[in-house]
Amino acid sequence: MFQVLSGVWALLLGIVLIMLGNGMHFTLIGLRGGIEGFSAAELAVVTSGYFMGFLSGARLTPLLIRRVGHVRVFAALGSFMSAGLIAFTLLAEPWAWTLLRVLVGFCMSGIYVAAESWLNDAATNETRGKVLSAYMIAQTLGIIGAQGLLTMGDAGTAALFIGASILVSISFAPILLSVTTAPAVEVARPMSLRNLFASSPLGTVGIFLLGSVYATQSGMGAVFGTQIGLSAAQIALFVAMLFAGALVLQFPIGWLSDRVDRRKLIFGAAVVGAASCGLGWITGGGLWPLMAVAFFAGGVTTPLYALFLAYTNDFLSVEDMPAASGGLVFTFGLGAIVGPLITGWAMQGLGPFAFWLVLGATFGAMALYALYRMTQRSALPVDETESYLGVLPTASPFTVEAAGAWAAEQAEAERDDDAQS
């Protein structure tokens, strides 16, 4: 593993720094928004703006890279993102923050496409799985670490926003100084939603609902914490627990994914998520029960994303996987735009604990639909399914495609080995 990482450590270091800055800004929006007196509904619109920009960036960045090249696009987007983070403190108005979030989301998506294409180009077929896994761990650790950095300053001043901007700015140094080649970036045209649904109804519906869950957790979690009176340090810990759970539960869920009917695992994970949110609703604002709830509710979210990708690929040919991956990323993005809006409206009308109500209902819908789909299609034999690879919801379509292709190659190789033995 150390030999594999020796060739990509600079890229991974840059990604950790980017995630430190981006993770700080996500939680800061909720903290500073509460200080500025923004309502839950207004902050929901601000949150959705990020995912609108992210979805647009995923589609347009490959075109920009083909026109002017990796380095120029990467440097330009990094500059705009760094400037956008500082600009949040200049005009504390919901409409201005929404526009800035669209900008930051667009830039972040483009940065992912460029960085992940470099990372994928640095890997070989033999090392790609390990490199992608290391990349996902680096991203998650960066988000968790960002919450610790938030305790070092006052959200009511510009200091933390400036710190996030600095982290993003310096993150490009190890990446740009270590990269020697500019790989081609080809992202397949997304499969239409109709064809995607025909291929995998559960994958399509499930990943839309999961987009709603992920965006609500990552974007509205700090808003919820602010409205129930948690301190800045407690809010940072709450958000960190959402992602710490994903780091811990990713491996056991991935291990089970290659050994049981994935629909049962999707159902079970969604039930755990719904039950956790129900406990969050019942137990109130007790600190440690809240942290336990966040650990399990957030812990099943990221593995579910990889599960839906793997399950959808089980019913596709290798040739269709790239287009389906793009369609799934687009569907996830639509859910991510809608979810915070519904949650913000509910919190505005029913109070802050509607945060758990909406999340629990969404997890519940996911579980019920998985249960329904078990009655409509027979399960594939486990030895005919594709390999599971833990892909984060923040991954660009480029990485989702690369991960799907790697999983298909691994599954095919395993079937060939079984046939020969």
Image (cartoon, helix red, strand yellow):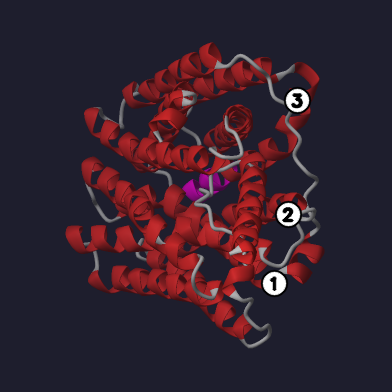
- Identify residue for label 2: 321
Give whichever of 8, 287 is nearer the camera: 8
Q: Could you tell whether 78 is left or right of 23 in the image? A: right
Q: Nearer the viewer, residue 353 or 205?
A: 205
Residue 318: image location, x then y, percent:
75, 55
Residue on which the image places disc 3 = 64
Q: Is residue 36 visible?
A: no
Q: Position of residue 153 (x, y in %)?
A: 25, 27
**CA distance for labels 3 and 1:** 33 Å
Task: Name above or below for residue 66 compared with residue 196.
Answer: above
Q: Amino acid at mark 1?
A: Pro
Image quadrant occupied by the N terminus: top left
Would you name the residue on which mark 1 appears?
201
> Which residue of the protein is positioned furthest toward the front in this rendering?
421
Categorize mark 1 by other alpha carbons within 10 Å: few (<14), some (14-19), many (20+).
Answer: some
Magenta residues? 42-49
Q: Is residue 227 left or right of residue 72?
A: left
Residue 147 is at least partly visible in this image:
yes
Q: Main secondary structure of the magenta part?
A: helix
Viewer-nearest of labels 2 and 3?
Answer: 2
Q: Tell me which corner region of the image, top left, top right, bottom left or bottom right, holds residue 70.
A: top right
- The residue shown at (54%, 81%) is 368
- Mark nearer the N terminus (3 vs 1): 3
**Residue 291 % position (x, y):** 25, 57
Cα separation between marks 2 and 3: 24 Å
Give how far apart the Cα atoms at labels 1 and 2 are. 15 Å
Q: Secondary structure at mark 3?
A: helix
The residue lying furthest to the bottom in this view is: 375
In magenta segment, residue 388: no
Is 200 drawn above or below residue 71 in the view shown?
Answer: below
